[in-house]
Structure formats: C-alpha cells, structure tokens
C-alpha cells in the first residue's frame, strides 16, 4: 500500500472527493502529520464559512431585469460579437478574406467539435498508426480530393496523424496536431460542406468548450478545433492553416 | 461524476433551465466580488450572451458548465486590469447593510488572482467536480488542483491574520 499522499489528494479529501481506495492511506497520513491535519480542518472550515456567508443569495428573488436579459433575442451576428471580443486579432482574421462569412452555426462546427472532443481526448489511439504520407494518400483517396496536412510547427504544433470519419452524408477526415504540453488541435476536412461561394474564417463554439475556426470553399469545408487553446491561440493556428490551404 | 442533464430539445426549454440557474449564478458572482463589475452586471452580461447563443447550449452537454464558462469569459475580461487595484478595492468603503462576515471574505478574496477565486468558489459554492471546473475555465485538471491548493492556503493565512488584527484593535 502506498502511504505517500499528494497535495492533490489532500485537496480531494477536503472536498470529500478522495477515492474510497485512498481514504485509509490519507487518514493514516493525516494522523502522522498534524500540520496537514490542521490544514485540512482549516480548509473544510473555509468551505463551510463561505457557503454559509453566501447561502442567503439563493433565496433572494431574481430581479426582473435579469429575466429580461435572458429573453432577449439575437441582435448581432455571432461573427460580429466574436470580433468585438477579440478586437484586432479577429479583424485580422476577417481581413484574410473579403468574402462573406458562413452563416452562423454551420453544420461543420458541430461535426468538427464532436470529432475533436471524441478523438483529442484519446491518449492511446487518437489517430491511425501509419506514416504521414501513407495516411494522407489514403484519406485523399477516400475523400476524392487532395488532403494535405498544413505545417503548424511554427506555431508549436507537430503533426500526429489522421483518421477517417463519417460526416453527415459522406466521409470526412480528421488530422491531429499536438503541442509541447500535450494541447491538441484538430483539422477537420468535410468535402460535403463545400460551398460555391468561398467564405472567410469564422469562429464558433462547439460542444464541451471546443472552439472552432472554420471556412468553406468550393471543394471542401475546413475546421480547426481545440478545447485546449484559447481563442487567440487557435486563431494563430487557423490563420496558418488557412494560408497554406488556400488555393 | 455528476449526472449530465438531459439533452434539451427546444430553445424555450433551455431558457427555462437557464433561468433556474440564475440564483446560483448570482451567488457565485456575489462571492467573486469585483468592483469593476458588480455581481448583477456580471450575471446580466452572462444571461444576455446565453440568450444569444442558446442554440449552442444543446451541444454543450453540461448546461451548468456552459453557463459558468460564459460567465468566466466575461469575468476574466472585466477582471484582467483589476489585479493591481485589488487591495484598494478591498479597502474601499462598501454599501451599507452588507454583512460583516461577507466583508471579511471579500477582503481575503481580493488578495487572490481572478482564476484562483473562480476555482475556489466553483468547488466550494457550486460543488463542481475538478473535471467540471477544468471544463468551465478551460484549463487542465492538474492546474485546477494546484491553484485550488494555493487559493485555500492563501485564504487560510488571510483569515488568520485578519482575526489577529481584530484582536490587536
């Protein structure tokens, strides 16, 4: 049995979230380390004090103006608001293309965000275990188009590999990149989302905190997604990929 | 892990679910205590954004994580320039009628960086799992753990020294 107890385990113990298997070891540790036991007791007391101090807020009637805020209907497009939030960086992104942005919440957003959250979380088999050129050749064949892996090394992301995915009604491809700290970025290729009229980069939020930059041209829909990167960091990557894939 | 709420079928239904979370958003915002953005302003901005993006709530899975995540983004933007003035904020006079314990907690809270405040309060008030906190704030779980530890230790020392000061007075 391992009697060494980590700080994270002590924190989990404070919150009643330590696993049953480790509880005995943690309690033995606390019995032998009075300072830690004192800290744990103090932390628990902090929690109680804070909950008690703010408990009454839950019973306050909700001001009508807050309910009104929730009833408001969209006034501005998502893209305009994203630009406001991002400022200069987003304007730069918009400047990439003079074409119109895709209509909000294009289906590629949901598809690519879903693919990202399913496969980027995978540690053992995030992608097909094959050589880069082989993977790209195989995906190109299945998607009936030239699938390329843009070089994102300059932004600090190395190519990990790719895999074939079901899209909505046709095959799609997912390429995965990884940063030094294990942050993952995926590039989704969805030929079924192609659009006659080319679009510029647009930002959207997918499921589970996944952020997505996407653009469509007459050959394919592309989406750069990550749950690990901030919007700004993702924008840098998206610009880099967009530049390389632009025809 | 806590049970995930059912997938909401309509925007109306989602709005209804969100409205039930308003008291919890208010409690959390109140405890975050930012002079730059009063609690209800923070809640209102969050709800406005939630209303705009309600179509994305369905895909978010955990509605509470999505909602507190929106508040986090708004809060961080408002709180970013605040750190330097945190102490001044803590010492500034407050509206009357505010409970004494809350005042002491606000002072202690003001000494923490914004993200440590958020982590401590999501764990303490919202009883979120560490994974949920990580998703809400978009940071790794390991970061949640180390900052939670730092936040608690700082708060403990703060409250101990506050208590000592009161005795001296």
Image (cartoon, coloured by chain):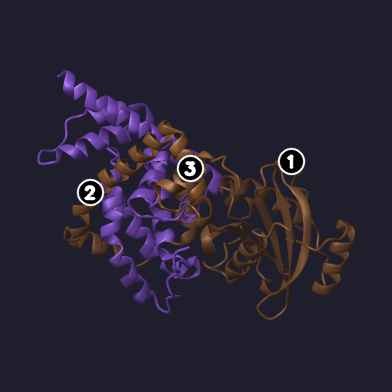
Chain colours: A brown, B purple
Checking the image for residue A103, the label placed there is none
Q: Quadrant of residue B54?
A: bottom left
Q: CA distance from mark 1 to mark 2?
A: 50 Å
Which x, y percent locates residue B11?
39, 74
Q: In what element is the residue under mark 3?
A: helix
* In-image side of A87 versus A148 (left or right): left
Which x, y percent locates residue A142?
82, 74
Q: Label 2 belongs to which residue?
A: A52
Q: Residues within 10 Å of mark 1 (few under 14, many from 20)?
A: few
Q: Residues within 10 Å of mark 2 (few under 14, many from 20)?
A: few
Q: Label 1 belongs to which residue?
A: A154
Q: Label 3 belongs to which residue?
A: A28
Q: Is residue B145 visible?
A: no
Task: From the viewer's side, name the closer residue of A116 and A68.
Answer: A116
Task: From the viewer's side, name the closer residue of A59 and A19.
Answer: A19
Q: Is residue A142 above or below residue A38?
A: below
User: What is the chain letter for disc 1?
Assistant: A
Q: Residue at coordinates 89% horizontally, 62% vertically from top-left? A: A134
Q: CA distance from mark 2 to mark 3?
A: 30 Å
Q: Earlier in the sequence, mark 1 or mark 3?
A: 3
Q: Earlier in the sequence, mark 2 or mark 3?
A: 3
Q: Quadrant of residue B100?
A: top left
* In-image side of A160 versus B67 (left or right): right
Which x, y percent locates residue A247?
77, 58
Q: In what element is the residue under mark 1?
A: helix
Q: Residue at coordinates 28% horizontally, 61% vertically from top-left? A: B22
Q: Is residue B26 visible?
A: yes
Q: Earlier in the sequence, mark 1 or mark 2?
A: 2
Same-chain status of marks 1 and 2: yes
Task: From the viewer's side, name the closer residue of A81 and A134.
Answer: A134
């Amino acid at each position: 049995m391992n009697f060494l107890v980590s700080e994270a385990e002590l924190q989990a113990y404070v919150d009643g979230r330590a696993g049953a298997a480790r509880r005995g070891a943690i309690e033995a540790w606390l019995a032998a380390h009075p300072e830690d036991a004192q800290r744990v007791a103090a932390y628990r007391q902090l929690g109680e004090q804070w909950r008690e101090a703010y408990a009454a807020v839950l019973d306050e009637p909700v001001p009508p103006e807050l309910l009104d805020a929730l009833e408001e209907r969209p006034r501005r497009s998502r893209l305009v608001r994203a630009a406001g939030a991002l400022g200069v960086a987003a304007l730069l992104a918009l400047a990439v293309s003079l074409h119109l942005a895709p209509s909000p919440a294009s289906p590629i957003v949901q598809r690519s965000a879903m693919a990202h959250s399913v496969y980027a979380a995978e540690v053992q088999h995030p992608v097909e275990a094959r050589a880069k050129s082989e993977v790209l050749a195989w995906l190109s064949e299945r998607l009936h188009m030239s699938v390329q892996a843009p070089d994102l090394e300059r932004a600090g992301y190395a190519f990990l590999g790719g895999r074939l995915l079901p899209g909505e009604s046709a095959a799609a491809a997912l390429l995965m990149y990884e940063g030094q700290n294990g942050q993952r970025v995926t590039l989704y290729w969805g030929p079924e989302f192609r659009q006659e009229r080319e679009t510029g980069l647009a930002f959207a939020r997918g499921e589970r905190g996944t952020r997505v930059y996407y653009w469509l041209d007459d050959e394919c829909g592309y989406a750069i997604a990550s749950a690990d990167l901030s919007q700004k960091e993702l924008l840098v990557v998206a610009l880099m990929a967009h530049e390389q894939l632009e025809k | 892990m806590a049970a995930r709420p059912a997938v909401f079928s309509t925007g109306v239904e989602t709005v209804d679910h969100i409205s039930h979370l308003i008291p919890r958003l208010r409690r959390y915002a109140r405890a975050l205590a930012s002079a730059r953005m009063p609690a209800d302003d923070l809640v209102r901005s969050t709800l406005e954004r939630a209303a705009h993006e309600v179509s994305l709530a369905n895909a978010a899975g955990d509605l509470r994580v999505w909602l507190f995540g929106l508040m986090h983004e708004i809060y961080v933007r408002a709180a970013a320039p605040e750190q330097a003035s945190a102490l001044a904020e803590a010492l500034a006079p407050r509206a009357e009628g505010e409970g004494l314990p809350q005042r002491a907690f606000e002072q202690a809270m003001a000494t923490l960086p914004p993200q440590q405040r958020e982590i401590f309060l999501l764990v303490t008030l919202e009883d979120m799992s560490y994974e949920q906190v990580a998703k809400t704030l978009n940071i790794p779980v390991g970061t949640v753990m180390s900052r939670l530890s730092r936040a608690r230790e700082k708060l403990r020392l703060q409250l101990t020294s506050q208590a000592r000061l009161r005795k001296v007075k």
